[in-house]
Image (cartoon, rainbow, N blue to C red):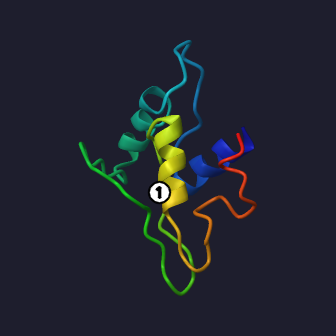
Amino acid sequence: MKRRQAIQTILGLPALTATGTLASSVNLLLPDAVATGKLTIVPNAVVREIAVDKNTGNANVVIVGASCLQSTCLLLNSKSPQHPNGLGNSMSTETHY
């Protein structure tokens, strides 16, 4: 919960409220993100990796909203000198669960 609140703060999104619907990026993240005017949606995009700065290892804010398996594949494919095992996988745990 704290992570979601931190992301909302970074993106300037209002707090999410319970709607009684199943949780998904479509009904939890997109409506508020669209309302900010800061969201760029690229429909039918094919993404192989998330590019990071070669010197710092940092990337712009990116929200990965693919399926569970495809999001994991995307993060694992996003390797750099600072992230040799992929983004978010510094302890090699993404493939263990």
Q: How many C-alpha atoms fall within 10 Å of the one at disc 1: few (<14), some, or many (≥20)?
A: few
Say which amino acid is labelled 1. Answer: Val
Drawn side of residue 64 relative to residue 43, left or right? right
Count up the numbered dots: 1
Which residue is nearer to you in this view: 20 or 25? Answer: 25
Tell me which residue sits at (37%, 58%) in the image.
Answer: 48
Quadrant location of the N terminus? Answer: top right
Residue 27, percent from left and from top: 45, 26
Name the residue carrying label 1.
62
In the rendered image, the residue lying farthest to the left is 44
Which residue is nearer to you in this view: 72 or 53? Answer: 72
Drawn side of residue 25 relative to residue 87, left or right? left
Drawn side of residue 69 relative to residue 5, left or right? left
Looking at the image, residue 92 lies above or below residue 13: below
> Is residue 84 shown to the viewer in this render?
yes
Looking at the image, residue 25 lies above or below residue 21: below
Q: Determine the secondary structure under disc 1.
A: loop
Which residue is nearer to you in this view: 91 or 6? Answer: 91
Quarter residue 20 falls in: top right
Residue 45, percent from left and from top: 26, 49
Tell me which residue sits at (42%, 61%) in the image.
Answer: 49
